[in-house]
Structure formats: C-alpha cells, structure tokens
Amino acid sequence: MHVLILGAAGMIGRKLAEALGRAPVVGSHGITRLTLADVVLPATPPGLEDRTDCLVADLGQPGEAARMAALRPDLVFHLAAIVSGDAEANLEKGYRINLDGTRALFDALRPNAADGARPRVIFASTNAVFGGDMPDVIGDDYLLTPQTSYGTQKAMCELLLADYTRRGLLDGIGLRLPTICVRPGKPNLAASGFFSNIIREPLVGQEAILPVGEDVRHWMTSPRSAVSFFLHAATLDPATLGGRPNLTMPGLSVTVGEQIEALRKIAGPRAVALIRREPDPLIQRIVTGWARAFDPARARALGFVAEAAFEDIIQAHIDDELGGEQPGLRRAS
C-alpha cells in the first residue's frame, strides 16, 4: 500500500508518520511506500527510512495537486490547511489553500478511479463547521452552521468529499476533529492555541497568556487520540457509514477553569501561577462561537475512542513530549 500524508510536517502529520513507522501496516495491508508532503520538507519517520519520500508541495499552487495524484497513492491523509486564526485574518489565502487546494486534489485523484483505482481519502475537518445559536450538546444530526471562514471552508470540503464519494470517485471519510490539546512545540496562529499554551508552557516553567475567561467551555482531545482517529478511519468498511462519510470525533468537554484545575492536580500551584490573564476580544469572539460539547454517537459506535478526563490529556503530553517528567516543577502529591 502506498500512503500519502499531506501536511506531514505539521504536528498531527508528523505523529501520524511516526505511528506508521512503528507499525507499518494499515488494517491488513503492509505499507510498501510512504510519501510525506508539506510546504516545508517533512522528516522521515524511524522504521520506514527505505520506503519514504519527502516532498515540498503547496496545494494552493497550480499543478501541485496533480503532482500528488500522479504518485498514485492508495491512501491519502489530507491534513494540509491554513489554521483558524490565519484563515479568518487572510480571506483569500484561506480559501485558496483550504477550499481550492482541496478541490484540486479531489479532482486530480478522479482519473485514478476511472481505471478501477479508487483511492481512500481521510480528510481532516473540524468542529468549527458548527456555529450560531447551538445547543449545549450537539448530536450527529445537527446542521452545519459555520461562523468563521475556516469553518465555512471545511464545511464546503465536507460536502465535496461526500459528493465525490457518492459518485464513486473517491472513498472518502471526513473527521471533525476536536481542538487538539496539548499541542507540542511553539504556539501557532490557531485561535484555539491558548487551550494548549496554558498547559504546555507552565509544565516547563514558562509563562502563558490566557485571552478568554475561565468559564469558556470547549471540546478537546489529545494528539495521541487524534492520530488513532486517522488510523482507525483508514480501516473502516465504507458500507458502515451509511452514505454519510463525515463524522464528529469523540472528545472531552471541559472549561478553561477545569483545565487549570487539572493542571494544578498534576503539576501544583507553581504551574498555575504562570498563567497570565490578558483578554483578547478577537479570540473571545471566535472561541465563544464554537461548540461546547458533542454526542458523537456514530463515531463511538464505529469504534473511535478518546480520553475520559482532562488529567489524562495532560499526562499523555507529559509522557509523549516530556519523557514523563516536568522540568523545573514539582509533581503534585
């Protein structure tokens, strides 16, 4: 099986490639070739050095989607995107990458289907496809009502994925990801970035900015769970989706205050004291328009699982990114 990961230099793309390196199979299919592509050169994962090609590619540029499709992948993980805050601030850039680039990719993959090769495409969507006057808990039948350009772009791509799958041009599955927390590395331009920042930086003794109130409630999961979502989706029987290929992923509904309390339990008061309140009206406006909780019954019935407590999310970050230790901070007793 030839696997292509678009957006492979990003956090989830990198972790997904590393997971495939540790276990180079997808379902019953061994990985014979892995192609990693992003706007910067991705890293080759350990375990697949002899079967990996790393490419620089920008789906927003003419001809790049066709170049990726010409590689004839059997499985495509489409993670490439402009994140929420950047897409809101740069309208044309967001539509060029998130919508136009995705449609170009889907169209470029269509000729493969004509000769019997129907590539599977796992598309990274978002819960930002929902918005407006939402109920406290959103079920699987709630309408798409995005309130940001990013959410609108992803909703359009979900509809494209569903239509191309219905017509037999692709074998598509769209995963509406919760906010990923705790994200390793440095802060990015995502409006949701502070959910990770207020945990990640204090754990290593650094100050973090909190731009919203502690009563803000949000839907989250760990990078570890997000990778498991993609790997599980790649093995699903399309017949189990019932003609509805876009799924809301499981997660955990927590307030910022509950995040902070979990940090206190794990790392103690010194870590919590490093969080500095600095209200940001733009971030507040964007985040308060997002969904607070979901009932992803379809995804759970299909075998997708996530954490049950925010302490588990923090501990996953400590284990996966900090070697199981918290530099410079005492462990809570």
Image (cartoon, grey):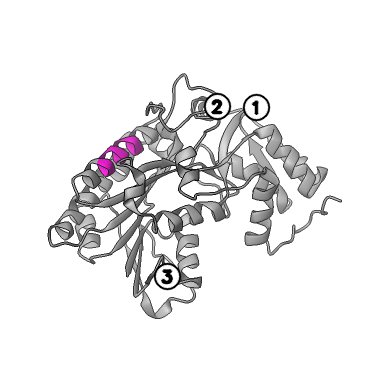
Position in image of residue 208 (x %, y %): 66, 42
Residue 160 magenta:
yes
Q: Is residue 25 above or below residue 306?
A: below
Position in image of residue 290 (x %, y %): 49, 29
Q: Tag 1's secondary structure?
A: loop
Residue position marked by numbered label 2 in the rendering: 284
Task: Name the residue type under label 1.
Answer: Gly
Task: Name the residue type under label 3.
Answer: Val
Earlier in the chain: of badge 1 and badge 2, it is: 1
Determine the residue positioned at 35% across, 45% down: 241
Task: Name the residue type under label 2.
Answer: Gln
Q: Which residues are magenta?
A: 153-162
**Badge 3 density bin: few <14, some 14–19, many ≥20, Cα 10 Å:** some
Q: Is residue 10 visible?
A: no
Q: Is residue 6 left or right of residue 65?
A: right
Is the C-beta separation of discs 1 and 2 under 8 Å? yes
Residue 213, label in figure: 1
Q: Quadrant of residue 234?
A: bottom left
| Residue at the far right in the pictured view | 333
Residue position marked by numbered label 3 in the rendering: 25
SS majority, magenta: helix
Q: Tag 2's secondary structure?
A: helix
Determine the residue positioned at 44% across, 68% down: 43
Is the C-beta separation of discs 3 and 2 under 8 Å? no
